[in-house]
Image (tube, grey):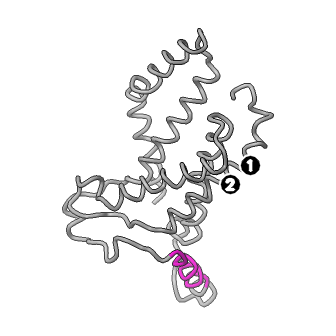
Amino acid sequence: MTHEYLIPIRMVYAFSPLITVLFLIPYSIWQHHRYQKIVPARMAVMFSFIFYLILMYFYIITPLPSFDWVLANPLPMPIQLNPFAFLHDIRQQVYWILSGTGHVNISHSAWFQVGGNLGLLLPFGIYLRCYFHRSLRQTILLSFSLSLFFELTQLTALYGIYPAPYRIFDINDLMFNTIGGAIGYRIAPCLRRPFHFLL
């Protein structure tokens, strides 16, 4: 299933010319107006930030299933509101491993879900502190808001394009995404010295 995680990268690469026109050109005009010049280092950081945001978006919506598949495989529970459900999943998977009674797919395991959701917005927290100079409170709020946008995108079946949700709205994802953004904020000072010329 590794190819699933390459889909977002391929899609961002395909849309890179559109990304440049819609985001980087207006940003370069604004930068020239403000600083009376274009700073290549800051342009590079902004491009990486835009690339990262769009990559995350494609990550949460892909792979795109067919309409027929969604109708034939309705989610038994489109909303998961138990904030500690991941603990049950981890305990269950540990039991499977120790007892040999079940198979754990690492790429879809509870550990991967926790680690992946922490890591997903960790760079977001770094960008917010180092490049946009946001406070911890603002970083937590913006991380929560971005994560909520992702979860609502899934809950609304890609804004009503699909006949039903094909991914679960999970409060654990919301929680770990927000924590990941806060962790990124906290570790950001470690990156300021080696990358100060970009910031």
Circle 1 — which element? helix
Between 6 and 61, which is closer to the camera in this rendering? 61
Residue 196 location, x and y as percent?
75, 29
Residue highlighted by disc 1: 187
Q: Is residue 79 left or right of residue 120?
A: left
Q: Amino acid at mark 1?
A: Ile
Residue that appears at 37% across and 58% down: 152
- The quarter in which the C terminus is drawn is top right
Residue 46 location, x and y as percent?
56, 29
Query: CB atoms at circles 2 and 1 under 8 Å apart?
Result: yes
Q: Is residue 67 left or right of residue 4?
A: left
Residue 171 location, x and y as percent?
48, 68
Q: Amino acid at mark 2?
A: Ile
For the record, the magenta segment spans 83-94
Between 99 and 28, which is closer to the camera in this rendering? 28
Q: Is residue 63 highlighted in magenta?
A: no
Check residue 163 in the rendering and tell me which mark sits there, or answer none: none
- The local crowd at label 1, few if under 14, some if 14 to 19, many if 20 or more residues have their Cα within 10 Å, is some
Q: Is residue 93 highlighted in magenta?
A: yes
- The quarter in which the N terminus is drawn is bottom left
Residue highlighted by disc 2: 183
Q: CA distance from mark 2 to mark 1?
A: 6 Å
